[in-house]
Image (spheres, rainbow, N blue to C red):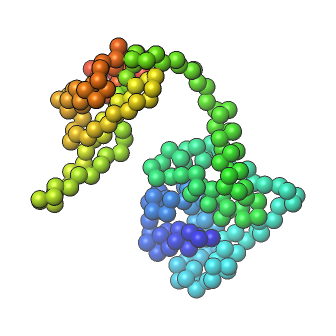
Amino acid sequence: MRKLREVLRLRFHADLSMRQIRNSTQVSLGVIQKVVSNAEQQGLDWPTIQSLSDTELTERIYPKPDVPLVPTQKQLPDWPEVYRELKRKGMTLQLLWEEHVEQYPARNFSYSQYCRLYRQWLKKQRRSMRQTHKAGEKAFVDYCGPTVPIVNASTGEMRTAQIFVGVLGASNYTYADATYTQSLPDWLSSHVRMLEYFGGCPDMIIPDNLRSAVSKACRYDP
């Protein structure tokens, strides 16, 4: 396993917590807990781990060979766990699939099958209400989560910028700009620039319960 030794090093040599190892290796928490637990049951310490080859280490951590009972049997991933892991910053289906392959080398799905099966599972979880947007009726506005670093070329000082985004409902026509804060003056200035960019004003501008936009957040009547 490509990341097996690194997980064990961070735990037994660097003495990091499970969550710190997860953030460092991008391996799911469940896999890390299983690897560490198996190593502890085997009585392994870091000097012993260093002395083992990759094959020997894998056999010690996963003593039972991953041989399917039926030749065509595949190991179905834990889709709810996959869904939760994807909410983490930087996590992708590609990384989760690689973990699946490492954990089940003889019973894994191809990447395309993995993605297809996940999409099929996800469709069954969501209940959605289709909305029809009329041209010029609504503009949806909010700040996106990640910030963008801005470096002053003269002083080298770096500050982070908040990214304002406005989208017209009917056409998905999108405007974005950057401000240093999410304060009311910056919020209003971004709206002015957005409307100038759109060349007009929609009937409604709908914020996502942002503090700069509403006095009291309400999920039912934004």
Q: Residue 197: x percent and y percent?
A: 28, 29
- Name the one closer to the observer, 211 or 179: 179
Q: Residue 116: x percent and y percent?
A: 68, 45
In the rendered structure, the answer to whether residue 87 lies left or right of residue 79 reads left
In the rendered structure, the answer to whether residue 100 lies left or right of residue 84 reads right
**26 in relation to 182, above or below:** below
Residue reaching furthest front?
199
Q: What residue is rendered at 27% in x and 52% in y?
A: 149
- Name the one closer to the observer, 206 or 77: 206
**Which quadrant, please, contains the N terminus?**
bottom right
Residue 84 visible in image: yes
Q: What residue is rendered at 40% in x and 30% in y?
A: 173
Q: What residue is rendered at 70% in x and 75% in y?
A: 59
Residue 194 visible in image: no
**Which quadrant, please, contains the C terminus?**
top left
- Name the one closer to the observer, 113 or 42: 113
Q: What residue is rendered at 71% in x and 50% in y?
A: 113
Residue reaching furthest top?
203
**98 in relation to 55, above or below:** above
Total marks placed: 0
